[in-house]
Amino acid sequence: MKEEIVNRVTQNQKLVTFDLEDYYPTGSRVSLDIKDWLYQGLILKENDFRAHIANHDWTQYKNTYVALTCSTDAIIPGWAYLLLTSQLAPYASEVVVGTLEMLETYLYHDILSHLDYTPFQDKYVIIKGCSNKPVPPNAYTMAIQNLQPLVKSLRYGEACSSVPLYKQT
């Protein structure tokens, strides 16, 4: 008599997948590089800079996430990013100074710091590894820090081939 093959992964009711893609905020991401607004790409001349700001169409950033950056080695005074943010604030969903990856990290920090983790209490959790969306590496570290105090164990990857990360003692 043949023994029935049992999929223990699907039968284990305590096994829960934590997928960071589930928390990915919808909306366009834009990197606004101000290098072209600088004299020779390096020097911020206040009058010229303010003229660029006055002539720029800020409505194009409606409901977008904006990363303010300067791709040259220019020294940008702090007020410049504040001035840009004041123009973006009525339109953009969020504004950060940095790269698009920094923007994603900021968004995930905000989401994960306000997430209710109690459904994962005393569960065996797998943090899903593969994603189709640009989930930043820091989002995974944030997730672990929030989940570890609550769960019985943490793994990374897929149920069929996960890497153990933590086990409650």
Image (tube, grey):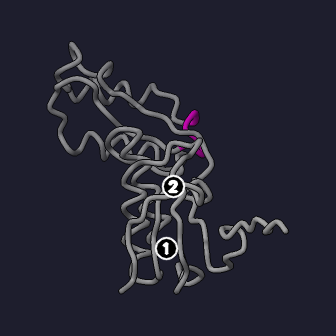
Residue located at (38% from left, 66% from top): 165
Outermost residue, top side: 40
Q: Nearer the viewer, residue 126 or 55?
A: 126
Say which quadrant the C terminus sits in: bottom left
Expressed as whole percent of the image width and height from the top left, the position of residue 85 reads: 38, 46
Residue 50, picture quadrant: top left
Expressed as whole percent of the image width and height from the top left, the position of residue 72 reads: 22, 23
Say which quadrant the N terminus sits in: bottom right
Q: Is residue 163 above or below residue 81?
A: below
Q: Read off the magenta span.
A: 59-64
Outermost residue, front side: 1
Mark 2: which amino acid? Answer: Gly
Residue located at (76% from left, 65% from top): 5
Q: Which mark is residue 157?
A: 2
In the image, residue 134 lies in the stretch drawn in magenta: no
Q: Left or right: where does residue 13 sit relative to residue 135? A: right
Q: Left or right: where does residue 71 sit relative to residue 53? A: left
Expressed as whole percent of the image width and height from the top left, the position of residue 110 reads: 45, 64
Expressed as whole percent of the image width and height from the top left, the position of residue 75 reads: 14, 32
Query: Gap between marks 1 and 2, in whole Å?
Result: 24 Å
Residue that label 1 marks: 114
N-term-proximal mark, 1 vs 2: 1
**Crowd class of label 1 (few under 14; some 14 to 19; many from 20; radius 10 Å):** few
Mark 1: which amino acid? Answer: His
Q: Give the number of callouts.
A: 2
**Element under label 1?**
loop
Residue located at (51% from left, 52% from top): 129
**Element under label 2?**
strand
